[in-house]
Image (cartoon, rainbow, N blue to C red):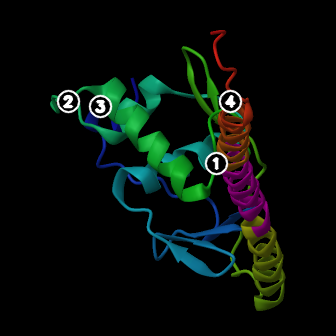
């Protein structure tokens, strides 16, 4: 066991460069912050440490045991499995990732987790130009999202209107048939009985 592993979670990972980029994300290790296309994400504490641990492994499996040793000292008594799951899920949520169709973090069953993208290490922050392009791309994505969400809402509206129209048509048809039926009996002449 490594000496750092024995001391547990207090260990802070320091990777070779100040800035780490992957996809639209940038990690500033000096400031311990993560940005997406220039907008700051709220990744703190253990969630931030999990991200750095995944980046440090760069495509290799980060085992659950390695995470436990990095995040919680040996003398800490917590439900490690539940806490690891919760922490990784918070990271996925912050990155906009999914465990069903992962883009950034893949779950390796019964082993751990793997970062799917290749990070880029640099001592210089991302230039404003590409971040603006990412924001424009996100804006175009966000403009298409309401349309995609509006389409099911419009469909639901039309289904509701259709059902109501069918109910009203059925009621009108029933009323019309009832009137004809009643009218038919009202018009039948009564035959006088034979004397």
Q: Which residue is mark 1?
A: 97
Q: What is the span of residues highlighted in magenta in the rendered image?
A: 147-167
Quadrant assignment for the C terminus: top right
**Alpha carbon distance from label 3 to label 1:** 32 Å
Disc 3 vs disc 2: which is toward the camera? 2
Q: Quadrant of the N terminus?
A: top left
**Earlier-in-chain disc, 3 versus 2:** 3
Residue drawn at 83 percent across, 89 percent down: 129
Q: Are marks 3 and 4 in contact (CB under 8 Å)?
A: no
Query: How many C-alpha atoms fall within 10 Å of the one at disc 3: few (<14), some, or many (≥20)?
Result: few
**SS for dot 4:** helix
Nearest the camera: 154 or 6?
154
Q: CA distance from mark 3 to mark 2?
A: 17 Å
Question: Viewer-nearest of labels 1 and 4?
Answer: 4
Specify whether residue 156 is painted magenta.
Answer: yes
CB contact under 8 Å: marks 1 and 2 = no
* For residue 2, above or below residue 193: below
Task: Determine which residue is flagged by label 4.
Answer: 185
Q: Which residue is identified by label 2? A: 78
Task: Residue 69: tell me if it is visible.
Answer: no
Please name whichever residue, 131 or 64, is drawn nearer the observer in this view of the structure: 131
Mark-to-mark CA distance, 1 and 4: 71 Å
**Residue at the location (49% across, 74% down)?**
30
Say what secondary structure mark 1 lies in. loop
Check disc 2: other Cα within 10 Å, few if <14, some if 14-19, many if 20+. Answer: few
- Label pair 4/2, CB-CB below 8 angstroms: no
Residue placed under numbered mark 3 in the picture:
6
């Amino acid at each position: 066991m490594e000496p750092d592993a024995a001391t547990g979670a207090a260990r802070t990972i320091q990777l070779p460069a100040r800035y780490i980029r992957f996809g639209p994300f940038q990690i500033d290790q000096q400031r311990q912050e993560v940005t997406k296309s220039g907008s700051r994400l709220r990744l703190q504490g253990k969630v931030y440490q999990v991200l750095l641990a995944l980046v440090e492994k760069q495509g290799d499996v980060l085992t659950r045991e390695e995470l436990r040793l990095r995040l919680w000292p040996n003398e800490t008594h917590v439900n490690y499995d539940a806490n690891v799951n919760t922490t990784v899920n918070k990271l996925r949520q912050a990155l906009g990732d999914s465990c069903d169709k992962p883009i950034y973090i893949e779950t390796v069953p019964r082993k751990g987790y793997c970062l799917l993208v290749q990070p880029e290490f640099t001592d210089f922050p991302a230039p404003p130009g590409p971040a603006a392009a990412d924001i424009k791309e996100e804006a175009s994505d966000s403009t298409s999202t309401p349309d995609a969400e509006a389409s099911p809402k419009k469909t639901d509206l039309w289904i509701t209107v259709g059902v109501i129209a069918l109910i009203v048509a059925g009621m009108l048809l029933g009323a019309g048939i009832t009137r004809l039926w009643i009218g038919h009996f009202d018009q039948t002449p009564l035959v006088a009985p034979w004397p």
